[in-house]
Amino acid sequence: MIESKNNLKAWLYLAPALILLGLFTFYPLFNAFFLAFVKDFNSITRSTHGMDGYAFVLFDNFSRVFKSPDFGQAVKNTAVIMLVSVPASIITALVISVALNSIKRFQGFLQTVFFLPYVTNSIAIGMTFAFIFHSDYGLVNMFLGWFGVNPITWVGPGASWEAGMTALLIYTVWGGLAFKILVFLSGLQSIDKQYYDAAKIDATPRGRVFSKITVPLLSPMIAYITITSFIGAAKAYSTIIGMFGASLGPEGNANAFITFVGLIYDALEKGTIGAYSVAASAAIVLFLFTFMFTLINMWVSKKRVHY
Amino acid sequence: MEIKLQSLTKVFVAKDKKETVAVNNMDITIPSGKLIGLLGPSGCGKSTTLYMIAGLLEPTAGKIYFGDEDVTNTPPELRGIGLVFQNYALYPHMTVAQNIMFPLENIKVPKAEALERAQEMADLVGIGELMNRKPKELSGGQQQRVAIARALVKKPRVLLLDEPLSNLDARLRLQTREEIKRIQRETGITTIFVTHDQEEAMSISDEIVLMEAGIKQQVGVPQDVYDQPDNLFVAKFLGTPPINTFAGKLEAGKIMLAGHNIGKVESKTNQEVLIGIRPEGFNVVEKSKLSLPIYMVETIGRDTALIIKDPNDEAKTFRAIVDSSHRIKPGDTVNFAIKPDKLYVFNKDTGELVK
Ligand SMILES: Nc1ncnc2c1ncn2[C@@H]1O[C@H](COP(=O)(O)OP(=O)(O)OP(=O)(O)O)[C@@H](O)[C@H]1O
Ligand SMILES: [Mg+2]
């Protein structure tokens, strides 16, 4: 048993972390749940508008979220980002990791190259990508031009949703690669080499080595990356700012790429009466949605993951 | 399938260009259908030799033949070998059945046939009831049998085992080595069994290959090698308790230990030598010139171990094993005669047996 006089010391050591967590995580968390049920919240008086205290509603703030003009667009964009970028980036990262793990020369150098995006600011990368996809002097159009493709407006004024989304997805996939490769590589390096020797002796074709040995043995890492990536994609926002700016869309088509988190910030920015409650409700909806998604993920991985 | 190693050499070159000669100019012929024990102390190059035969390591020099076929440059999957790794390397995410079937699925054997052959093999090694378990739900001995079944299921020409018993406890080890012997007899497959345990190698092998520091020391039937060691290393490595060695002399064909004549040799040259006497080579007799004081006595059932002061050096002791019918107490002085077939003379410098 731990002696009780040591408890005080323990709490003392924990205090800085607990205070910061309380201030910036737990308080806002509970506050959001609280605000979501306050009627006509006035952010200046910090009470229900025209009252001294609070009046409560059950679904009003939530229904304002669902009725917001951008709600449909936000759901669509978020869903597309989640369902396309996550599988695409996981598969790409897996292939690159396996390739990196099997080469001997330049391995360290290439690992650094692939890891760089992780330590680079995502807004800066977004701006670089906006330039790469520039319709007049972007690299992508130049490259496509070699094959006789007419310049496409990817992100500039008048860009179509499809073109913009393609650019955004490529950027999102690329931006997420670094961390995934890092995790997969360390996973690959911890797999006992004897499994591969055994496979070699048993004349296992390459594809089968990958699908029957590497992937199952890496499955805990894949499950971890899948869950965190889905959560990350559900929260996509800064990537869109980086690419399209604060208007969340190409010029003349603002909010074309709004996401669920975009919806929250939009409401916060308006600052009108009740806007904070709408933002809080939207955040709760997003939370419930990611929570459900994670449960499904965990349920699937329980059947497929070998620990 | 007869296996022939011809001047097989493996040199590892480290990053700092340091060279390790793991296997040095090995010449061995392994007869078809036999179980061969590859024996030697840790780090002597046993695994390296085995992996070169398997094709997982490329020899620096020399050749490997399976029968008349030169397989030196054949990739492992085309050599027709089964390999059991030291820690089995069973795929942890597959069931026993899936593990055993894996090599068959690789060569596209139809599922039903693969399952049937896997079951047959599992029955042979005595794990037929465990087909749906995962490796971590098996005991060490059971895992080892799965590994053997997986190695045998594709009917390899050669079975290679790398210290397969080293992870097992003493009892399981005894039991499993009998099992390996039985499986090898039933299948008649040429088998190489790596171990650093001399007793294991002696009991299981048709022939043993003894190596040290990458160099082959002696090849032969275990009892022959034990009885006729070519050199001091071989004599010391085989037998528990190990052989006793004493500094001695050859004088006109007589073997002299501390001034006593204990035997004779053909060679008439006078020289200083190392005398080796197996612990069981001492006879207790009524009268002899070699009478030694007993320091300690350990009776272990049938035998009595006598711990005796070294006649050359009072500070050292050695061990003799005699019949426990002799009632000997510590402090007694006992007369010994040395059994000629348990007495060896080695060159003092090279360790070679002096004829
Ligand atoms: N990949 C390698 N690189 C460099 N040196 C190596 C390598 N593999 C083995 N060696 C060296 O070669 C020698 C023989 O190693 P090997 O693994 O064949 O020994 P072993 O007889 O199997 O020993 P053990 O009984 O401990 O398994 C050792 O000195 C070892 O350090
Ligand atoms: Mg070894």
Image (cartoon, coloured by chain):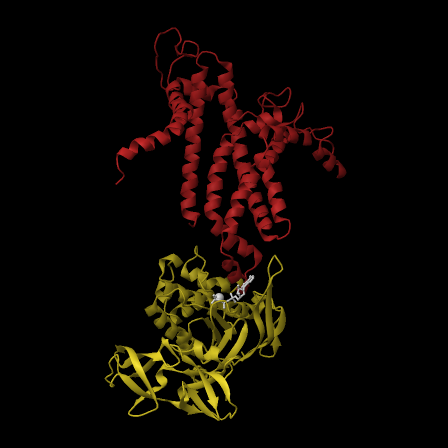
Residue B154 spot, x, y in % from top left: 50, 69
Is A152 or B71 nearer to us in this picture? Answer: B71
Q: Residue at x 52, y 50 (%)?
A: A188
B272, above or below B89, in the image: below
Q: Eyeballing the image, is B154 above or below B205?
A: above
B295 or B107: nearer the viewer: B295
Nearest the viewer among B329 and A246 is B329
Chain letter for yellow, please: B
Residue at the (25%, 86%) spot, across then down? B326
Residue at left offset 28%, top offset 84%: B333
Spot occupied by residue B343 in the image (x, y as percentages of width and height)? 42, 86
Question: Seen in the image, is B50 located left or right of residue B314?
Answer: right
Is residue B212 something one can see in this rendering?
Answer: yes
A296 or B41: nearer the eye?
A: B41
Residue A286 relative to residue A127: left or right: left
Question: Splitting the image into 4 quarters, where does residue B9 fall?
Answer: bottom right
In the image, taking residue B189 as reference, residue A104 lies left or right, namely right
Q: Where does residue B337 sit, x and y in percent of width and height?
A: 35, 89
Residue furthest top as drawn: A50
In the rendered image, what is the letter of the chain coloured red? A
